Image (tube, helix red, strand yellow):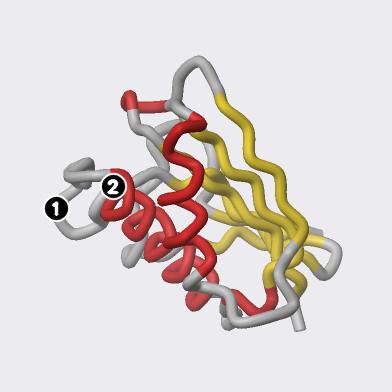
Amino acid sequence: MKTIINTTNAPAPIGPYSQSVKAGGLLFVSGQVAINPVSGELVLDDIKTETKQVMENISAILTEAGLNFSHVVKTSIFLLDMGNFAQVNEVYGSYFSDNFPARETVQVAGLPKNVNVEITVTAIVA
């Protein structure tokens, strides 16, 4: 059985997918980009600000599911330019205190809406 979890505190999906799906004791959060959920506008001022918006969107979805970043067991980071790795990693890391999740970071040829970073997470449902 699966349960769809959506919140208005994160951007609405821009395609045929859900913000997150709870199944088998896990929460699968779809890739998030830096769309401000209030204005619907992209936040692309700089890579740190963009990453912060992505992480805030993920946080809102986790919160809606009754979870937080301590429940995250796996993340995937997709970067348009690996040269932004250090700055993205700095912001990303500030959302975790210890027991960091497994992760991969990959450079890709393109991302939705021509953003610079997209992040997805999987969390364990406690």
Q: Image quarter for residue 60?
A: bottom left
Quadrant of the drawing holding the C terminus: bottom right
The residue nearer to you, when weighing 95 against 35, is: 95
The residue nearer to you, when weighing 24 against 32, is: 32
Residue at 18%, 59% in the rendered image: 38
Q: Where is residue 2 in the image (x, y as percent from the top left)?
A: 74, 58
Q: Image quarter for residue 29?
A: bottom right
Reply above or below: 125 against 24: below
Residue at 21%, 46% in the rendered image: 43
The alpha-carbon separation of the residues under discs 1 and 2 comes to: 8 Å
The residue nearer to you, when weighing 84 against 50, is: 84
The residue nearer to you, when weighing 77 against 83, is: 83
Residue carrying label 2: 35
Q: Position of residue 89 (x, y in %)?
A: 51, 55
Q: Position of residue 26 (x, y in %)?
A: 77, 65
Q: Which residue lies furthest to the top in this view?
A: 109
- Name the kind of residue labelled 1 in the image: Ser
Reply above or below: 66 against 106: below
Residue at 73%, 65% in the rendered image: 101
Q: Do the residues labelled 1 and 2 touch (CB within 8 Å)?
A: no
SS at badge 1: loop
- Name the kind of residue labelled 2 in the image: Ile
SS at badge 2: loop
Q: In this view, does 71 lie to the left or right of 13?
A: right
